[in-house]
Amino acid sequence: MQIRIISPLEKVFDDTVELSAPEYSSTATAGGEVCSFQIAVREDGDERGYLRIACESALNIRLRTTDSVPVHLPADNPDEYYLRTVPGLYPDLLGELEECDTFRVLTNQWRVLWVTIPVPEGCRPGCYPVRFRFSRMIDGEWTPCGETEFKVEVKPVALPEQELIRYEWFHSDALSAFYRVGMWSEEHWEIVERFARNAVRHGINALYTPLWTPPLDTEVNGERPTCQLLDIAFDPEKNTYRFDFGKLERFLDMGLRLGFKKFGMSHLFTQWGAKFTPKIICTLPDGREEKRFGWHMKADDPSYAEFLKALLPQLIGFLRKKGIADRCFFSVSDEPSEEHMESYSRAVGLVRPLLEGIPTIEALSRIEFYEAGLVPHPVPCCNHMEPFSGRVKNLWTYYCCSQQQLVPNRFMAMPSARIRIMGVLAYVYDLAGFLHWGFNFYYTQYSRKLTDPFACTDAGGAFPAGDPFLVYPGPNGEPLDSIRNEVFHDGLQDLRALKLLERKIGREAVLAFLKQGRSESFTMTDYPRAPEYLLELRPRIYAELAKA
């Protein structure tokens, strides 16, 4: 049996014969950091069946299987920095071991385990060996068949709190649909909280808050499942509204308890131009529910303006009373383009006076909207950063299915280093936030139907595999992680370590430190591609801190 410890930036495909990944025997870490690596095991010959793994360490160790999932669309506009561009099985899903310590191996095929070590804050500095012993069943008994060891060097430093706002759209409706539980039933609340807790654990600190069904990736005249936190009573005769914020308060209290720092309110108008109103359900005096707004009503209909003028002052008063108004933001309409200037301007003119200074944050690639004062907090995609960089204070960025040429992204077909590098680039560009549209989007494009994320990783062939979601819907309402979720979080830890170094030596010195050994510029399209750069980065930072 072959046993190899490899870095978290390697991806081992099921058809790999010769494992070329270098040995990865140790790492340096700080208190409060989560470190990861992989153990690759291969049974040569006729042996196959189950192996048991035992772990010895003074640190807490979590073991998961690194499993492959089907990829039908790896990329539709790839560059040279992809691992593969053909359909097949790609490693991504982190599954649970059977009975906590047992996993199956197949003959002449590498089997990979993902090891996660959350180093406690205040952990005593020093070297912590982690020993793994394997055994297989022979004649009814577990018999030793191999062992290996990894060393964790805990440094006398602690990572600072994450400053970057990470905002991954959280699709509460997809959880109700996939698990077949009633929207905002007690079962749904429990599942939402489990997924939200996973998000916080991975550095997602802004929570998408569905005041009403998110008007996102929805086919014109189509619908997503009604997912509305506001209970709204409408009296047609009096043309008046009453608002109950009970469910909204429960949602916000959950977010605060879990550790979210910001709350993004659902978009005020439909996506791509603000031409229509979002789906909003109201209860009539006789108890019937009415779809008061939606695709059937244009954004400039006077009745929607009346609704927002009734709602927003009360909503903002509620948020101020809870003491979290300064932690909230709104969005008008995702990614408006040039032909939407008129409709978007009209929407901004309506809502800006009603928001009482609460900011709007918008995914935006056309700087004309910023220059016109329509989007004070633009979030340009990473391949359109340059016109905004240096001009916009507290700049954010995002990427999605369209960012496939050279820039970082999180597709399954990309090397893990291309995912993790965003943390370093966030430091270089001095970013205040990062946005992505799909923490857990389990629909096909335009939300036409529900998918099985274990079989469909590309929203029905619409987006490169890995774009729609970061976590899988596991058994009993528990999220299962992906390699990409773990690796992006590693990038956030790189960012925190760089911020720590900045406190000691200053920003300009840190920028020079990052470029050591590089003649090229450091941009969204020109950055270190080799995993070694990232694997050596934090040890280099900790060594530099020791000298400072």
Image (spheres, helix red, strand yellow):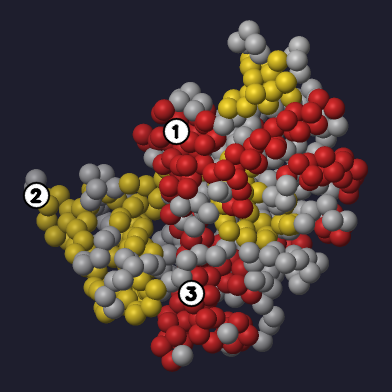
- Mark nearer the N terminus (2 vs 3): 2
Image position, residue 440 (x, y; %): 54, 42
For the point 52% across and 49% down, which residue is it? 470
Observer-nearest residue: 195 or 55?
Answer: 195
Identify the secondary structure beneath mark 3. Answer: helix
Residue that appears at 50% across and 51% down: 260
Looking at the image, residue 341 lies above or below residue 189: below
Q: Which residue is mark 3?
A: 497
Q: Which amino acid is tagged 1? A: Trp
The residue wearing badge 1 is 189
Q: Disc 3 and disc 1: Cα gap in Å?
A: 35 Å
Q: How far is the residue under mark 1 from the one under mark 2?
A: 44 Å
Nearest the camera: 260 or 14? 260
Mark nearest the camera among 1 and 2 is: 1
Residue at the image position 47 percent from the left and 66 percent from the top: 161
Name the quadrant containing residue 547. Answer: bottom left
Of label 1 and label 2, which has the lower sequence position? 2
Query: Where does the image place residue 322, in percent across and percent down from the top left?
Result: 54, 44
Residue ID at (34%, 79%)? 155
